[in-house]
Amino acid sequence: MEIAEDQQYCFTADTPDIRIDRFLAERLEETSRSYIQKLIKEGNVTVNQQKIKANYKTNPGDQVFVRIPKPSTLDILPQNIPLDILYEDEDVLVVNKPKGMVVHPAAGHYSDTLVNALMYHCKDQLSGINGILRPGIVHRIDMDTTGSLVVCKNDRTHRILAEQLKTHAITRKYHAIVHGNLETDASIDAPIGRHPTDRKKMSTSSRNAKEAVTHYHILKKYHNYTYIECELETGRTHQIRVHMASIGHPILGDQVYGPAKCPYRNLQGQTLHAKILGFTHPRTGIYLEFDAPLPEYFRHLLEILPR
């Protein structure tokens, strides 16, 4: 497995009096604020070529340079965890991820992830572009979201699929149950960024939001609920969950963006399933599409929801 080089970033501050750790946390969305503070303490963050402390406050025009060192050791171990494989060849693997499984290791959570299972199943045949903590991972879905995910077995495949993601050439259709009654199919075009006060959430009111577009289609209406299909045009963190909540129709079971109390106690997270995944195969040039069947809990819910 190839090991990624150090990651380096350069930002120009445009707002005064923002703590440097908060400034970077808003831009490095997948990096925790505590880790950013560690980078600052170790001298991996400079402002105008000078080392600073975590309480430094930005000035417009500041040139902020960040170096994130590559991981020095591989402490992620392969685990013999069963995988629901929808497709596999020498370049790609498409899996149907179960509910409750984290995609890749993170601080404090280095076992029982999809990556642990992939390392056991694929041995050393995984791309290394995203570093040793995320071998093979070109995109991800939330822990409590189920469904299809493509894994790359080599760096060439990873680069090609990453470009397809960037140009919106990969088909991604999700099924979800939302609160309330939607009247017609529609699109939501609302930029998404890190929540201004809660680092664990995303928001459509973020100052540093990025373009985000979701198209939704009504599949079936229930009493006070709607079963929908959402197609992603972009792929921001928590995109469907944030977008549906932003129009007053949060996903059933989503306790982060929806009601704190769920009427169906055994859901354990949002009713969101990555059903359709389609992409052009990097080696053959043939378009492939996969349909991950709805999990049992989701099918059962569709049967018992009040009509």
Image (spheres, rainbow, N blue to C red):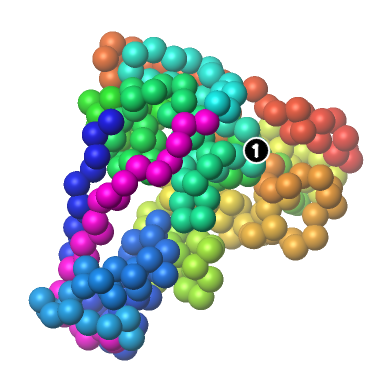
Q: Is residue 66 magenta?
A: yes
Q: Is residue 180 magenta?
A: no
Image: 53 above or below 201: below
SS class, disc 1: loop
Position of residue 50 in the picture relative to residue 121 (left or right): left
Tell how many labels. Answer: 1
Q: Nearer the viewer, residue 230 or 260?
A: 260
Position of residue 22 in the picture relative to residue 67 (left or right): right
Please tell me in which quadrant of the rendered image residue 138 appears.
top left
Image: 15 above or below 299: below
Q: Position of residue 6 (x, y in %)?
A: 20, 52
Residue 113 in sight in this render: yes
Residue at horizontal 69 percent and vertical 42 percent from the top: 271
Q: Nearer the viewer, residue 191 or 163?
A: 163
Residue at horizontal 29 percent and vertical 50 percent from the top: 71
Residue at horizontal 17 percent and vertical 79 percent from the top: 51
Q: Position of residue 261 (x, y in %)?
A: 80, 60
Q: Quarter holding the N terminus?
A: top left
Q: Main secondary structure of the magenta part?
A: loop
Residue 173 in sight in this render: no
Q: Residue furthest left?
A: 49
Mark 1 = which residue?
99
Please tell me in which quadrant of the rendered image residue 298 appears.
top right
Q: Quarter holding the C terminus?
A: top right
Q: Position of residue 258 (x, y in %)?
A: 69, 59
Position of residue 271 in the picture relative to residue 122 (left or right): right
Q: Position of residue 278 (x, y in %)?
A: 44, 23
Residue at horizontal 53 percent and vertical 42 percent from the top: 111
* Label 1 environment density (alpha carbons within 10 Å; few <14, some 14–19, many ≥20): many
Q: Mark 1: which amino acid?
A: Lys
Position of residue 8 in the picture relative to residue 148 (left or right): left
* Residue extent of the magenta highlight: 56-79
